[in-house]
Image (cartoon, coloured by chain):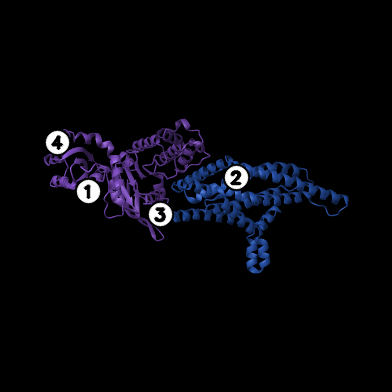
């Protein structure tokens, strides 16, 4: 057990280090922060304007502008993440294949799933480190709201975002393990995530038990639950399932593809 | 140390390797020789646990490669054809990482990395990013990652490919130094490399091992053995008449040359089991009244053995190109060979006069 943990840590550290050494990762971070910052101010202004308008027109029902800000911003972040995450996950295995380092990992006394877990944790850490600066200005905005926003709701919303990212990255890691082309990995991951994003709508179109089942697979629906501060166990289970599925498929595909190719 | 038994690997309908059996003793260097696509890499990948075999088993350091894969992996250092390197890491950082995933405890790691870098002459570049290294240095880092956990068995897939001559010599010396403490298998298609570095050779062709032996014995085994090339004044019929009766002579063949018609160049091959003596040949030529102009001993080279074992045609008679290669590589052994005909040479001019 100690050896497995040590292996995961070794993979994790190497992978994380490669993100912080990669120009692409900085480019992604820059674009992410730019977009997030832009949309945050935009949502902030819209919310403020709406509140001012409501106040001025003597609206009776008080508008919870803080919650609106939080939900609006989490929604935007998830949309940006839809584009960012496939780029972060595309190289996880495709790069290793291209460089031939997968042969090193596969001939070392380390299991496939330990490699997969280490890599997933690393890329997730990188994504979380992208979120950290945003928390600063979120904290400033939420601290000024009256009535104050429940701390639990904020935390749950962000946990939801991290879980969503973990699920997407896990599936992206699997797709990355199928090819040695990073571009293909990114494109296919994007397509798959987009499909899982909108599957809710597809399910509603179909209707019936199949439609329900499809709708339940939707990432957006479950993310929406958490972002609203609803702690739904089925949402947590769904995200956990996606994460485990991605790790499992990755470990399997690394073996299977190794056996196929000479 | 390594026992390979009836190993086969089948992709669809084609067998990459079939019924490969060989063994390597502890401390030996085995050269794995074969044309491209013969199955060298496949065999090595099976031994390292990268590929599963379709049939057969192999044991490395007493552990079965299929049932005890993790134990085997711990005891093998492997350098694939392209060194597995992370360009964004420094040499030292990379070796630390490899030591870590090979299961070296944190306390030992620094010392092991240091030793590996010292052995591969990388100490002065330890903080250099791998991305910035030349091909030769990358190859050295590749070897360093194969030996960093001090494994009993080291498997090197074409370790000298793409290096310049000086680097090749360095790498060969490094490999020779590894023998003794480690058991080494290295694959190559550069033949002199095998005779220079390896204790034993396994020649593999079309997925089958066609010969295993020491390089010297392999050369001695081959039919023909050593021979002579002679340039004689006289016609072929006369020369054959003079030389064929000698018991050690197997054949006398003319070599096409652009010599004037009164000269003839022939190659004399020895009967297996007999030693062809230069003085016998010279004596016979002198006795027949022919003029001996030139006499040169030709050694069977590993190239010839290799070609004979791996060439499809049942008639493995060397072509003109082959003999040219053979001559070229026979050159180093010539100083001793050219001494021998000397006693005969003085006779030749006399005959001419």
Q: Residues within 10 Å of mark 2 (few under 14, many from 20)?
A: some
Chain at numbered mark 4: B
Q: Secondary structure at mark 4?
A: helix
Residue B271: tell me if it is visible.
no
> Chain A takes which shade in the image?
blue
User: Which disc is residue B52 wearing?
Assistant: 3
- Nearer the observer, disc 3 or disc 4? 4
User: Which disc is residue B8 wearing?
Assistant: none
- Nearer the observer, disc 1 or disc 4? 4
Discs 3 and 1 lie in a common subunit: yes
**Residue sitting at the far top:** B124
In this view, B264 is above or below B54: above
Q: Secondary structure at mark 2?
A: helix
On the image, numbered disc 1 is attached to which residue?
A: B223
Residue B308: tell me if it is visible.
yes
Q: Quadrant of the N terminus of chain B?
A: top left
- Nearer the observer, disc 4 or disc 2? 4
Along the viewing direction, whichever of B159 and B37 lies nearer the viewer: B37
Q: Residues within 10 Å of mark 4 (few under 14, many from 20)?
A: few
Q: Earlier in the sequence, mark 1 or mark 4?
A: 1
């Amino acid at each position: 057990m100690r050896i497995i943990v040590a292996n995961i840590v070794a993979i994790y550290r190497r992978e994380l280090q490669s993100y912080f050494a990669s120009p692409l990762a900085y480019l992604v971070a820059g674009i992410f922060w730019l977009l997030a910052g832009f949309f945050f101010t935009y949502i902030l202004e819209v919310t403020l304007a709406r509140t001012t308008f409501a106040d001025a027109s003597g609206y009776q029902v008080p508008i919870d502008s803080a919650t609106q800000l939080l939900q609006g911003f989490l929604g935007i972040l998830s949309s940006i993440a839809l584009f960012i995450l496939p780029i972060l996950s595309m190289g996880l295995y495709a790069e290793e294949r291209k460089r031939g380092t997968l042969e090193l990992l596969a001939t070392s006394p380390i299991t496939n799933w330990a490699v997969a877990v280490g890599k997933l944790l690393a890329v997730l850490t990188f994504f979380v480190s992208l979120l950290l600066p945003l928390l600063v200005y979120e904290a400033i905005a939420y601290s000024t709201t009256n009535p104050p926003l429940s701390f639990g709701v904020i935390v749950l919303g962000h946990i939801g975002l991290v879980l969503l990212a973990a699920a997407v990255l896990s599936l992206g890691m699997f797709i990355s393990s199928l090819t040695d082309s990073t571009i293909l990995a990114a494109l296919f991951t994007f397509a798959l995530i987009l499909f899982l994003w909108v599957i809710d709508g597809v399910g509603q179109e179909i209707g019936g038990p199949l439609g329900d089942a499809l709708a339940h697979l939707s990432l957006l629906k479950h993310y929406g639950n958490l972002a609203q501060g609803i702690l739904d166990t089925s949402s947590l289970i769904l995200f956990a399932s996606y994460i485990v599925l991605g790790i499992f498929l990755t470990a399997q595909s690394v073996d299977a593809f190794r056996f196929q190719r000479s | 140390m390594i026992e390979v038994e009836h190993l086969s690997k089948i992709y669809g309908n084609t067998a990459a390797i079939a019924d490969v059996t060989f063994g390597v003793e502890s401390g030996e260097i085995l050269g794995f020789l074969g044309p491209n696509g013969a199955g060298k890499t496949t065999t090595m990948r099976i031994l390292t646990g990268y590929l599963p075999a379709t049939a057969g088993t192999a044991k490395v350091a007493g552990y079965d490669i299929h049932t005890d894969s993790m134990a085997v992996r711990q005891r093998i250092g492997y350098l694939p054809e392209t060194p597995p390197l992370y360009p964004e890491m420094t040499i030292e950082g990379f070796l630390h990482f490899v030591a870590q995933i090979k299961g070296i405890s944190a306390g030992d790691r620094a010392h092991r990395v240091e030793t590996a870098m010292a052995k591969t002459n990388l100490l002065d570049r330890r903080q250099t990013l791998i991305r910035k290294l030349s091909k030769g240095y990358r190859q050295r880092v590749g070897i360093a990652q194969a030996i960093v956990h001090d494994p009993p068995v080291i498997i090197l897939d074409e370790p000298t490919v793409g290096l310049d001559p000086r680097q090749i010599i360095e790498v060969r010396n490094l490999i020779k130094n590894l023998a003794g403490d480690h058991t080494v298998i290295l694959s190559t298609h550069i033949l002199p490399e095998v005779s220079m570095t390896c204790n034993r050779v396994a020649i593999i062709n079309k997925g089958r091992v066609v010969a295993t032996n020491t390089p010297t014995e392999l050369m001695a085994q081959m039919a023909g053995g050593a021979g002579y090339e002679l340039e004689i004044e006289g016609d072929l019929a006369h020369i054959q008449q003079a030389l064929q009766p000698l018991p050690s002579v197997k054949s006398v063949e003319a070599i096409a040359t652009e010599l004037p018609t009164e000269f003839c160049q022939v190659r004399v091959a020895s009967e297996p089991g007999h030693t062809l003596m230069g003085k016998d040949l010279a004596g016979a030529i002198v006795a027949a009244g022919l003029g001996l102009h030139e006499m040169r001993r030709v050694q069977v080279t590993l190239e010839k053995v290799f070609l004979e074992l791996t060439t499809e045609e049942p008639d493995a008679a060397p072509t003109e190109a082959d003999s040219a290669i053979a001559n070229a590589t026979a050159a180093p052994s010539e100083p001793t060979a050219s001494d021998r005909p000397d006693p005969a040479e003085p006779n030749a001019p006399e005959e001419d006069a």
